[in-house]
Amino acid sequence: MVSEKRIGRTPAGGDYSEVFYMDMKHNLVDKEKAEIAMIHECKNDGTLIRETICMFDRKEKSE
């Protein structure tokens, strides 16, 4: 899955949110391989209210 859409109120007052999963070169990738998540909060007509970018730490930690 390279993206997810969730219907419902968002923190910024949108009607739905979409999450796009990407690698560091901004190519869409499966959620499990993602290094970046771009979250869009939108109104029902598609108007973008807020864009948030998150980075994941995918490095394995040794114990």
Image (cartoon, grey):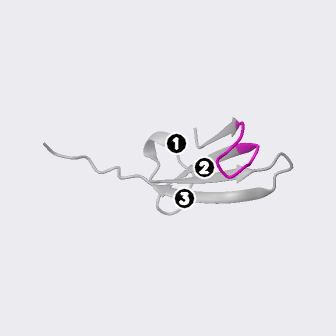
Name the quarter where the N terminus is drawn.
top right
Question: In the shown orientation, is residue 2 left or right of residue 54?
Answer: right
Question: Callout 2, which amino acid?
Answer: Phe
* Disc on the earlier residue, 3 or 2: 2
CA–CA distance in space, label 3 to label 1: 16 Å
Residue in the image at 52% along x and 42% along y? 30
Q: Using a 10 Å C-alpha cutoff, classify the residue at mark 1 as few (fewer than 14 neighbours), some (14 to 19) or many (20 or more).
A: some
Q: Are marks 3 and 1 in contact (CB under 8 Å)?
A: no
Q: Residue at x 58, y 43 (%)?
A: 2
Q: Quickly name the residue at label 2.
A: 20
Q: Write the residue at 53% across / 48% down.
A: 29
Q: Secondary structure at mark 1?
A: loop
Q: Of circles 3 and 1, which is in front?
A: 3
Whichever of callouts 3 and 1 sits on the residue coming sooner in the sequence is: 1
Left or right of residue 30, residue 48 in this image: right
Q: Furthest residue to the bottom?
A: 25
Q: CA distance from mark 2 to mark 1?
A: 9 Å
Name, please, the residue furthest toward the right. Answer: 45
Q: Amino acid at mark 3?
A: Ile
Q: Circle 3 is placed at which residue position?
A: 53
Element at badge 3?
Answer: strand
How far apart are the two marked residues, 3 and 2, measured between alpha carbons? 10 Å
**Quadrant of image for the C terminus:** top left
In the image, the segment drawn in magenta is 7-16
Residue 16 x/y as whole percent: 73, 42
Residue bearing mark 1: 30
